[in-house]
Image (cartoon, rainbow, N blue to C red):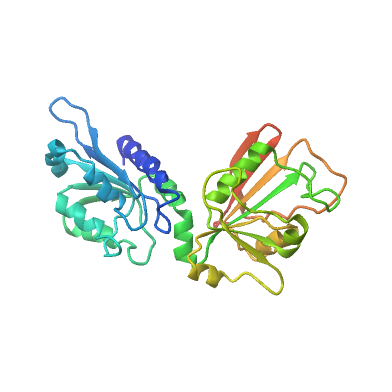
C-alpha cells in the first residue's frame, strides 16, 4: 500500500457517499479507474462511478461506462480502486467480478471485504484465480465504517442502533419532569438530518403520550423514518425489524427506554447533545453511559456540544 493507493481510495469513499439515500438496501460503493504514468504523462483517472440506486448498475459498472472510447485501450494496464469487494453472484445485476475480468484490468485495490453472505471473499477469490493482482485493506476501517449499517444488519440480523438524547449541563433531560428545549435551532436541524438517513425511529409510550413528538425531518430534506412506539405490551422485536429490512434505528425515547437498551447492550452508537449553558434544579436524570462507550467525535456549535460514542468491542 502506498500514498497513491490511499489517495484514490479516498476518492472512492467520496463517490460512494453520493448513494447514501438511493442505494439502500444495498451498500454505498465507489469505484475509480486509474491509468499509469506513461509517455511523460502523470497517472490519471480515466473512469469513476458509484452505486446510484438499488437495482441499477453497481459502482464498477458505472466507472467502466464513464471511460471515454479513446481511453479504452488503457484498461489493460490500469488499476481499479473500489471501496467494497466486487460482487461475484447474480442478483438484480450481473457479477462485477466477471466484468472486471472481461475488461482486462490487471490490478484491483479493494477497501474491505463484503460481509454479505452471497459475497464474503468470493469476488476476491474469483479475480485472483483469473490472474488479477488484488490488494485488500486500503483504508479498511474507513470503508467498513461507511457501510456499518449494512454490515451490522447482515452480521447481527438486526438494525444498526443509534441511541440519542439531549441533556442539560448538569445531567437532566427535562426540567422538573416537564419537556424543555435543550437543542438549538441548528442542532435540531442536524438531528433531522440524521433522521433522514435512517430507516426507523423509536420512542417509549410515556414520551409519545407526554411530548407528542412528530419524529419527522421537517427541518431537513428527505424521507421520514418509520415511527415506532414501544411499551411493556409492545416490546421491540428485532427479528421483525430484520424481516422488514430496517437496517438502522434511532432510539429517542425517555431515560427508562434508553437505559433499557443500554442495559441489554442493544446499541452500536450513542449521540449525546449537551447544552453547556443550561442548568435546571431537578427532573429526569440522564441514562448511564456504559463503560465500553468510546468517544469518536466531538462537535461544538455555540453552547451546544455533541459527542458521538461507539461500542468498544475490545473491552
Between residue 80 and residue 73, name the one nearer to us.
73
Is residue 142 at all visible to an observer of this figure? yes
Residue drawn at x 71%, y 69% as measured from the top left: 231
Location of residue 240 (image quadrant): bottom right
Q: Does residue 105 appear to the left or right of 56 in the view shown? A: left
Q: How many marks?
A: 0
Q: Position of residue 140 (x, y in %)?
A: 40, 48
Q: Does residue 291 appear to the left or right of 107 in the view shown? A: right
Q: Residue furthest bottom?
A: 233
Location of residue 34 (image quadrant): top left
Q: Residue furthest right?
A: 281
Q: Where, quadrant-wise, is the N terminus in this rendering?
A: top left
- In the image, residue 200 sits, relative to residue 78, either above or below, namely below
Q: Position of residue 259 (x, y in %)?
A: 71, 60
Residue drawn at x 43%, y 56% as measured from the top left: 24
Q: Position of residue 108 (x, y in %)?
A: 25, 48
- In the image, residue 275 sits, relative to residue 226, either above or below, namely above
Q: Position of residue 253 (x, y in %)?
A: 69, 58
Residue drawn at x 50%, y 68% as measured from the top left: 242
Q: Does residue 269 appear to the left or right of 85 in the view shown? A: right
Q: Does residue 187 appear to the left or right of 284 in the view shown? A: left
Is residue 295 at all visible to an observer of this figure? no
Between residue 167 and residue 180, name the one nearer to us.
180
Q: Where, quadrant-wise, is the C terminus in this rendering?
A: bottom right
Amino acid at each position: 500500500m502506498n500514498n497513491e493507493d490511499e489517495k484514490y481510495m479516498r476518492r472512492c469513499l467520496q463517490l460512494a457517499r453520493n448513494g447514501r439515500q438511493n442505494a439502500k438496501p444495498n451498500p454505498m460503493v465507489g469505484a475509480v479507474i486509474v491509468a499509469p504514468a506513461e509517455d511523460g504523462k502523470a497517472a490519471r483517472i480515466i473512469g469513476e462511478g458509484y452505486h446510484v440506486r438499488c437495482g441499477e448498475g453497481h459502482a464498477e459498472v458505472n466507472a467502466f461506462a464513464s471511460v471515454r472510447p479513446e481511453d479504452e485501450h488503457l484498461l489493460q494496464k490500469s488499476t481499479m480502486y473500489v471501496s467494497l469487494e466486487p460482487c461475484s453472484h447474480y442478483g438484480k445485476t450481473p457479477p462485477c467480478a466477471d466484468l472486471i475480468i472481461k475488461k482486462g484490468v490487471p490490478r484491483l485495490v479493494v477497501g474491505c471485504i463484503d460481509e454479505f453472505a452471497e459475497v464474503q471473499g468470493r469476488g476476491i477469490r474469483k479475480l485472483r484465480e483469473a490472474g488479477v493482482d488484488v490488494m485488500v485493506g486500503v483504508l479498511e476501517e474507513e470503508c467498513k465504517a461507511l457501510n456499518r449499517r449494512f454490515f451490522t444488519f447482515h452480521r447481527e440480523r438486526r438494525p444498526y442502533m443509534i441511541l440519542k438524547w439531549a441533556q442539560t449541563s448538569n445531567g437532566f433531560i427535562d426540567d422538573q419532569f416537564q419537556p424543555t428545549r435543550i437543542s438549538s435551532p441548528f442542532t435540531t436541524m442536524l438531528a433531522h438530518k440524521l433522521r433522514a438517513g435512517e430507516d426507523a425511529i423509536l420512542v417509549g409510550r410515556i414520551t409519545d403520550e407526554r411530548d407528542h413528538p412528530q419524529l419527522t425531518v421537517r427541518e431537513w430534506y428527505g424521507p421520514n423514518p418509520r415511527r415506532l412506539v414501544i411499551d411493556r405490551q409492545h416490546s421491540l422485536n428485532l427479528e421483525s425489524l430484520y424481516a422488514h429490512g430496517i437496517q438502522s434505528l434511532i432510539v429517542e425515547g425517555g431515560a427508562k427506554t434508553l437505559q433499557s437498551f443500554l442495559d441489554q447492550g442493544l446499541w452500536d452508537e450513542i449521540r449525546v447533545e449537551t447544552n453547556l449553558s443550561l442548568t435546571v434544579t431537578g427532573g429526569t436524570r440522564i441514562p448511564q453511559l456504559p463503560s465500553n462507550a468510546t468517544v469518536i467525535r466531538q462537535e461544538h456549535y455555540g453552547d451546544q456540544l455533541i459527542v458521538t460514542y461507539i461500542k468498544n468491542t475490545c473491552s
